[in-house]
Amino acid sequence: MVLAQLGGSISRALAQMSNATVIDEKVLNDCLNEISRALLQADVQFKMVRDMQANIKRIVNLEALAAGTNKRRIMQQAVFTELCNMLDPGKPSFTPKKGKPSVVMFVGLQGSGKTTTCSKYAYYHQKKGFKPALVCADTFRAGAFDQLKQNATKAKIPFYGSYMESDPVKIAVEGVERFKKENCDLIIVDTSGRHKQEAALFEEMRQVSEATKPDLVIFVMDSSIGQAAFDQAQAFKQSVSVGAVIITKMDGHAKGGGALSAVAATKSPVIFIGTGEHIDDFEVFDVKPFVSRLLGMGDWSGFMDKIHEVIPTDQQPDLLQKLSEGSFSLRLMYEQFQNLLKMGPIGQVFSMLPGFSAELMPKGHEKESQAKIKRYMTMMDSMTDAELDSTNPKLMTESRIIRIARGSGRPVRDVMDMLEEYKRLAKIWGKMKGLKLQKKGDMSAL
Ligand code: GDP
């Protein structure tokens, strides 16, 4: 995901600003221009970036910034708030209720991932105890019904469609009626998506919507669409009453800024994101954790909630203390590795932090990652207490490295690798220094 680059660029702009000896109008403007450039490069719409810049200038008090020691945090908080506001249209979308029939219609351009997303959405709700059903009202694309049928069969979800009937409205109405009779509580209607935003597509969509009276229309958008996102989303919104957005292919090279544009254009929240081709590659979208990640701040709000949720109360103070000290010894790394391997509660917590899981344990390579972590631990077993408790990487002299390599029967290169990993994790851990962690979802870490 190119989002990481955006986070990096914004962090650099903030760092440059906080390094300046005097914070005046020019320094602030330079910083905001840098941030704006980064957002534009990430495909956020021009007008939104301009508005955001103006809002931040209004929020950030230059005097407080000049006097304060936490310039970076003040600015980062302002950027965070603004991005959250952009992504939060202020009204939640309709949510289906179990046992009460709801009709949800999916719209979007061909290739956006609409059919795949219908199945993911159905499967997600099925796991939550809903009784979903899929209706294929895409009579335009040859193979659309087959694709839906295949996905539905795999996930054991009832489906409806026709190879013969060419009227999408008729199929949609028949499908919805049938599944209502069968007491399905979530009836999902997949509509056709043409290549372009042509008049016929919008007319067809409008007719299907009028005939099935959906409780919710979900607009599916491919995240790689870039700057065109705003116009595309707006065109759909003008034809049918879009109530929510799902952004697909967030696992690819998309810049992600299009999500913000789609929200602005439809005034509807993003509710899920697609992160792969598999039916399980589907995540609930939450604004705050997303923006935190976008800004390279880690998923703080989720992280705090998770700590309170999964760590036994008596263990919380100790962990929070270590976090707030920000000092990360090799021993602490060893302990966290043990937790990661167990994938116990703390493993879950740390998997939310950037660097701890995604890089150390990338999805699909769990076996290799586990072997690597075990290797690291074997080498750490050959370390002295002083080495394990030190937070000073300079302590690890050449002779110590050679001794550890010999003691653990590993090549020197492996010990060097492990120490590099330690430095990387120590840097992430260091960011948590000074956290005030008492409250649930506390954002004072920013
Ligand atoms: P539709 O024409 O809008 O119905 O699009 P499809 O559902 O047929 O999807 C088009 C292609 O995108 C297919 O190859 C899907 O497997 C793929 N796709 C859909 N969602 C995602 C996603 O979140 N990530 C990735 N990597 N591929 C996806």
Image (cartoon, helix red, strand yellow):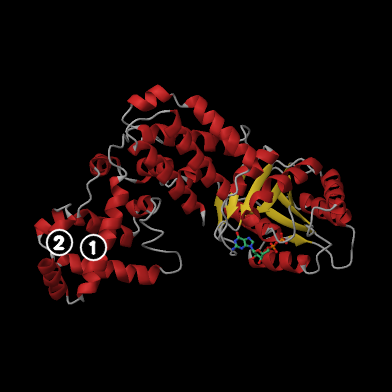
Which label sits on residue 100?
A: none
Is the residue marked 2 within 8 Å of ligand 1, measured from its CB?
Answer: no
- Return the residue at label 2: 396
Q: Residues within 10 Å of mark 1 (few under 14, many from 20)?
A: some
In 3D space, how far apart are the residues under numbered discs 1 and 2 (Cα atoms)?
9 Å
Q: Residues within 10 Å of mark 2 (few under 14, many from 20)?
A: some
Seen at 33% across and 38% down, the residue is: 19
Q: Amino acid at mark 2?
A: Met
Q: Amino acid at mark 1?
A: Leu
Q: Is residue 108 above or below residue 362?
A: above
Q: Nearer the viewer, residue 224 or 61?
A: 61
Earlier residue among tags 1 and 2: 2
Measured as percent of width and height from the top left, residue 38 is found at 52, 46
- Return the residue at label 1: 419
Seen at 73% across and 57% down, the residue is: 134
**Image quarter for residue 300?**
top left
Seen at 11% across and 66% down, the residue is: 400
Q: Do tag 1 and tag 2 residues touch (Cβ < 8 Å)?
A: yes
Q: Is residue 249 above or below residue 325?
A: below
Measured as percent of width and height from the top left, residue 45 is found at 63, 43
**Image quarter for residue 90?**
top right
